[in-house]
Amino acid sequence: MSTTRRRAAASLQWQRILSELAGWTLSLVTVAALAAVGWVGHATHWTFGLGGHAGDGHGGHAAVDAGGAVSGPAAGEEAADGAVIRFHSKKDLERSGIEVVPVEERPMVSEVVANGVVHYDDRRVAQLAARVSGVVWKVERHLGDRVQRGDILMVVESSEVGRLKAQFLNALVAYEARREQLAILDEVKGVVMGRQVREAKSGVREAANHLVIAEQALVNLGLEVSAGDFAPLPDDARAARLRTLGIPPDVLAGIDTDRVTSNLIPLRAPFDGVVIGREAVVGEVVEPGRHIFEVADVSRMWVVLSVSKEDAAKIAIGQPVRFRPDGSDAECASRVSWISTEVDDETRTLEVRAEVAGDDAARLRANTYGSGRIEVARLGTAVVVPQRSVQWDGSRWVVFVPAGETAFAPRAVDPGLREAGHVEIRGDFADGPPTLVVGEGSHVLKSKILLDRMESGEL
């Protein structure tokens, strides 16, 4: 036999030895655990009976785990499944630490808990920049100021604005001149050539187009201007009005308007909100596309929750949401308004969004972390027991109900909604739900049942 084969055979033999040792170790641990349970049962003088008297020596079955429903026989009756655990005396029962608690009937809510963070509403946050290059002439609003739609944030002085204003005035004058020329030709069209009249009409249309283009150039800068408003005015009035176009009197307070440059253009707030960013000082050069002001509407905020992928299937649009920021005792209420179509690559969680408005939104601060609870189910009335009352016996969920002064019987149940250490129980409540179940100590009864099963060879 080669060296390689000998090594392989030796390795297999060691693997079999280790496997046998692991099996013996597990068996020894199991026997030790059962011996401990048996000692506890002996110390409390338990006996198992099929509805019989204490000490009859017969065994039964029981099983439970947190989260089930309850139903059981009245005192002195046999358990529905034929299993009853009896204590030798009331004193033994007291020493076991078993406590009986009442069964409640009340509304039940199932919630998914998720961490979250507060954001501004992305649809109501604006990063503002000057539309033309220039120099900051005046700053009207500062960080934290509340603004309304149309309020002036700052005024920029730009030579490009002055050029476009002059172009508008020139286009208006050219249009008026073309119209006067056409009017004169119409009066004497009998003595002039038709070609001259046609050229005059074409000139009017061309001048009108240039005027529209010049007007639109100013409108594109945010200046409200109309050729019809300027047409009736004399030249001096036109120039004076166009010089301060878009600049309200309060901004020009204390300034001689006759000496104000015609190069001014305001930057206005697009909606009601709060100034959350400002990077502008008087005399600073600004360029188009460079963000100078940031305005956010804080009357509506977003709460973005990170839901674990295990709970993702429970979430639906419209479900109630309650969010509590860290360090606050107040909760804000909302509903699920958006669910992401993908799980985050890094956190492996599902992003869920709720919109908060009104007074609740006023209490929130952007980028604040907190905890959210999404209501995924609600019952008007449910049979509720403490979660520790429900035990699992390996094949079913059960609770223990009194079957006499010192006896308890397991009853199979189906666990339902869970909330704050309580669980809804469902089952065959043809005669009405039980009124009492074992709370503290129910795991001890389960252990006695499992021990009896092993002694009878059923496990």
Image: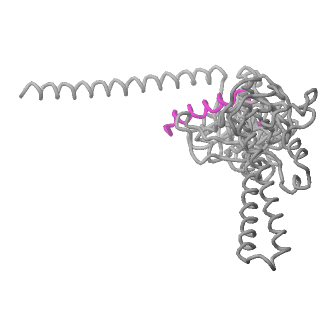
Q: Quadrant of residue 236?
A: top right
> Which residue in the rendered view is the most extreme toward the left?
1
Residue 144 on image: x %, y %: 82, 26
Residue 42 on image: x %, y %: 61, 22
Residue 288 on image: x %, y %: 66, 37
Q: Quadrant of residue 63?
A: top right
Asked if residue 240 is positioned above or below residue 254 in the image, the reply reads below
Is residue 233 visible in this depiction of the protein?
A: yes
Is residue 438 visible in this depiction of the protein?
A: no
User: Which range of residues does the magenta coloring cover?
Assistant: 436-459
Residue 266 on image: x %, y %: 80, 37
The residue under the point 91% across, 50% down is 234
The residue under the point 72% across, 55% down is 213
The residue under the point 74% across, 38% down is 125
Asked if residue 4 is positioned above or below residue 419 in the image, the reply reads above
Is 160 included in the stretch rendered in magenta? Answer: no
Nearer-the-camera pick, 431 or 406? 431
Q: Is residue 216 left or right of residue 243?
A: left
Nearer-the-camera pick, 458 or 315? 315
Is 454 included in the stretch rendered in magenta? Answer: yes
The residue under the point 58% across, 41% down is 309
Q: Quadrant of residue 110?
A: top right
Nearer-the-camera pick, 220 or 190? 190
Quarter of the picture containing the N terminus is top left
Asked if residue 249 is positioned above or below residue 79 in the image, the reply reads above
What colouring does the structure picture have? one colour
Asked if residue 292 is positioned above or below residue 243 in the image, the reply reads above
